[in-house]
Amino acid sequence: MSARRRRLWVTALAVLAPVLVWLVADPLLGHRLRIADGERTLDISAVPVVAVALLASLAGWGLLATLERFGPRRARAVWTGVAGAVLAVSFLPLTGDGMDGGTRVTLALMHLAVAAVLILGLGGRSPEAGAGAARG
């Protein structure tokens, strides 16, 4: 499998992972994911979950491809460090007010699900890396 095709599959899985968390929390367990901001309340449906996961996945893929192009020796190590830092920063909004504990835990699990798929799938050694295949 080419590196590009593998990364496409990883991206798809990284989008699917938080949707599965959302499906368990919202439709199956009946816990509506809501964030209150003053007088407004945001209900988190599957659409924003997919959109945010897709954007994060494509940004991660793009950063890795850029790093591989300009610094191929340490690209994966640098990318993995950046991905870990982004994951840590992504938890900061979960410390604020406006959501109950169930929403907070569900969102944290979604962040972890996306990060786990991307870090293991994009940041791990690919079979092509040792063979000098084209990167994508």
Image (cartoon, rainbow, N blue to C red):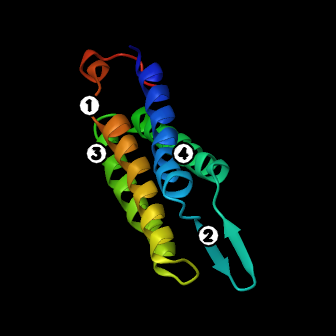
Q: Residue at x 69, y 69 (%)?
A: 42
Q: Amino acid at mark 3?
A: Ala
Mark 4 vs 1, N-terminal side: 4
Q: Residue at x 29, y 23 (%)?
A: 129
In the visual, does 45 lie left or right of 57? right
Instruction: Work out whether residue 43 or residue 9 is closer to the camera in this orientation and state it.
Output: 43
Query: Which residue position is annotated with label 2?
Result: 34
Q: Residue at x 42, y 23 (%)?
A: 6
In the visual, does 20 lie left or right of 41? left
The 10 Å Cα crowd at callout 3, few under 14, some 14 to 19, many 20 or more, is: some
Q: Secondary structure at mark 3?
A: helix
Mark 1 vs 2, N-terminal side: 2
Distance from disc 1 to disc 3, alpha carbons, whole Å, reads 10 Å
Distance from disc 3 to disc 2, alpha carbons, whole Å, reads 36 Å
Mark 1 vs 3, N-terminal side: 3
48 up-or-down from 68: above or below: below
Q: Which mark is residue 59?
A: 4
Distance from disc 4 to disc 3, alpha carbons, whole Å, reads 17 Å
Q: Amino acid at mark 2?
A: Arg
Q: Amino acid at mark 4?
A: Ala
102 up-or-down from 74: above or below: below
Q: The N terminus appears in which quarter of the rendering?
A: top left
Asked whether the residues under the numbered discs 1 and 2 touch, taking CB atoms below 8 Å apart as contact, a structural biologist would say no
Query: Which residue position is annotated with label 1?
Result: 125
Numbered disc in front, either 1 or 3: 1
